[in-house]
Image (cartoon, grey):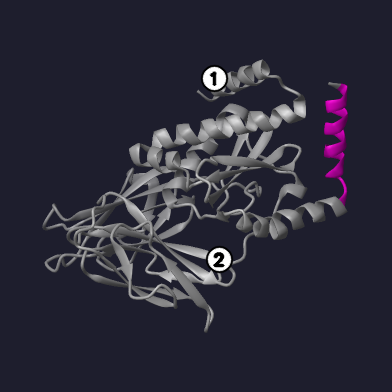
Amino acid sequence: MNGAKASREFRDGLYHSPEITVFCNYLADVLGPKINKEFGLESAEMQDREKRNFDALRKLTEDAFGGIELTDHSRKKPSPRPSFHVCPWTVTIIPGEEQMFEAKGKSGQQYEWDATDIPGASFSKTTGDKVILVINKTAKYNPDEQYRLVAKELPTGISRIAHVKIASARELTLVPRSGSYVVNDLVTFKAINLPTETTTLDWRADPSGAGEFIKTRGIGNVGFIVKKPGRCVITANDPINKTVFATSDIYVKEEKADTTMVDNDTPLLKLEETVIEIKTLSATDVSLQGFVEERAPKHIIFHLNVNHPKYHKTMKISESGWREYVLGLIVNHYISWLSNREALNSEDQLRRIGAIMAKLA
């Protein structure tokens, strides 16, 4: 036990050295991604609903173990602005009809497109800044699912995702369909696929005090300033034909003065005194559910494999089931990491897992 304590104190002391911190950052940010690629571990972006569910898990862990604070050496500079984006980034496609996608970035940049997540999809070509996608008329799809179209910048490997919904006929849709925001954000909504007979739309928010519309009637872009944290449902409907309507779910949180997020897109959780940063990856070895990387004595990174069958299965069944799966996975990996620092035996590990889950419950 004394040997384990001495080893832990030695490792913790390393983080007080600026040279070691720079070296660790080099390993994590430069060399690490290259090694990961060689082993078939590629970073993956989260969808809006995944970020929304991680927000819920963060609140759950903060309610149980207190607010999240990161030490100075754990913070990172904000992520640079995207080098390109995909247009349209969200769209409804009818099987048999053509849909063009464009990657907008630097002139002369090359892109590679991947539609393996979309059932029955085929391309006119798979490279270039513009591609045409068609979905086979006999394709079997879930009308409630949002599928992913991935554009990858060459040779950097940076990727962007467009969200594709498949429908038998075009229906009124609000863009964005969902999202996470902070108080005082201005969200611009756009209604697409309007029926030809619809000449205007009425807009409302539920609850009514959740925010303020720039205008409450019209078919053009509508601005909405969010005022209160929590869930808010935006509805646009035809005032003459009430059967024509569409909704968008947005989730609003208070903006905090301190910079506790590592960057705007990285979810954080807290278990006991340890901050857990969540990063997603797509691993060719589907038996790998995730792994832990130690960033600092009380700050670890959990790499979650979004290519694991259970990850997709639980999300499709229910979001609550997905949250339960992910939280259980993180807790077990956290205790496994902790056992190496505190020399926990198997009984101690089980007891610690039970105590954490009981507090979270």
Which stretch appears magenta? 2-18
Asked if the stretch drawn in magenta spans residue 13, the answer is: yes
Q: Which residue is mark 1?
A: 358
Indicate the quadrant where residue 293 lies.
Answer: top right
Residue 168 lies, with reference to residue 11, above or below; the image says below
The amino acid type found where label 1 is placed reads Ala
Q: Position of residue 98 (x, y in %)?
A: 26, 72
Residue 130 lies, with reference to residue 248, above or below; the image says below
Q: Position of residue 23 (x, y in %)?
A: 81, 55
Q: Residue furthest bottom?
A: 108
Under circle 1, the secondary element is: helix
Looking at the image, is mark 1 or mark 2 earlier in the sequence? 2
The label on residue 327 is none
Residue 332 lies, with reference to residue 125, above or below; the image says above
Q: Quadrant of the N terminus?
A: top right
Crowding around mark 2 (Cα neighbors within 10 Å: few <14, some 14 to 19, many 20+) is some
| Residue under the image location 48 percent in, 38 percent down | 56
The amino acid type found where label 2 is placed reads Ile
Asked if the stretch drawn in magenta spans residue 294, the answer is: no
Q: Which residue is mark 2?
A: 158
Q: Does the rendering let one see residue 228?
A: no
Q: CA distance from mark 1 to mark 2?
A: 40 Å
Residue 151 lies, with reference to residue 349, above or below; the image says below
Indicate the quadrant where residue 100 lies.
Answer: bottom left
Q: Does the rendering let one see residue 10?
A: yes
Q: Is residue 346 left or right of residue 15?
A: left
Magenta span: helix, strand or loop, mainly? helix
Q: Is residue 231 left or right of residue 92?
A: right
Labels in figure, total: 2
Q: For this rendering, which residue is in front, 76 or 256?
A: 76
Q: Position of residue 241 (x, y in %)?
A: 11, 56
